[in-house]
Image (cartoon, rainbow, N blue to C red):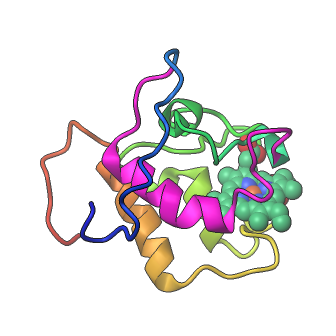
Amino acid sequence: MCAIVSGCSDAPAAPPSDSPPDSEATTWIQTNLLHPQCAQCHWKVDPSAKLDLYSPGLEARVVGRGASECSNAILVVPGNPDGSYLLRKIVDMPPRCGSRMPIGQNLSEEWVQWVRDWIASLDHTAPSQEGG
Ligand code: HEC
């Protein structure tokens, strides 16, 4: 990861002991996308929609978890980006509930693809794929 992430000296804090550690892909997307683009609202203290995208232990908070402000929506379905509400919230205009994220801004196609790749990578049962 050090090849892509600039400033490798700043190692992420250890996740709290009650949540399983995040994968490298999760830490990467968190550091490079969620922190700069989402964490000002989805902060660890009183986050928008009770969704903390800032703290470590992200997978435990989003994988297989229902959305707090949209019924029958799962935030992240491993291996199924299009079935994941978190992805739908950044691509659908408008999404099923609420506003498109990040509010007032647009993520580049490239970032949307990184989010897709991240969600796909969370399916540890799938055979590894190059490209996609
Ligand atoms: C300017 C503030 C702001 C920013 C920036 C922002 N959000 Fe949100 N987010 C909100 C608010 C407010 C809600 C609740 C209303 C709604 O769903 O539209 C929300 C809801 C959500 C939800 C639904 C959570 C649930 O359980 O219902 C997801 C998923 C989400 N945001 C993801 C993101 C992602 C990913 C980013 C960054 C790419 C982001 N948000 C950036 C304010 C923000």
Can the viewer see residue 65?
yes
| Magenta residue check for 33 | yes
**114 versus 25 height, above or below:** below
100 with respect to 81 (left or right): right
Instruction: For the C terminus, give its image quadrant.
Output: bottom left
| Magenta residue check for 70 | no
Image point 69% across, 61% down: which residue?
A: 38
Can the viewer see residue 97?
no
Judge by depth and name the residue closer to the eye, 77 or 40.
Answer: 40
Could you tell me how many numbered marks the image carries? 0
Image point 53% across, 51% down: which residue?
A: 84
**75 versus 96 height, above or below:** above
Residue at the limit of the structure toward the top, as seen here: 18
Residue 33: give x, y in percent of width and height: 54, 66
69 with respect to 66 (left or right): right
Find residue 68 and report its image quarter: top right
Q: Magenta stretch? A: 19-47
Residue 111: give x, y in percent of width and height: 49, 75
Image point 72% across, 69% down: which residue?
A: 102
Find residue 114 and report its image quarter: bottom left
Image point 74% across, 80% down: which residue?
A: 105
Judge by depth and name the residue closer to the eye, 6 or 100.
Answer: 6
Residue 123: give x, y in percent of width and height: 30, 42
Instruction: For the N terminus, give its image quadrant.
Output: bottom left
Residue 10: give x, y in percent of width and height: 44, 54
**Ligand 1 image-quadrant field:** bottom right
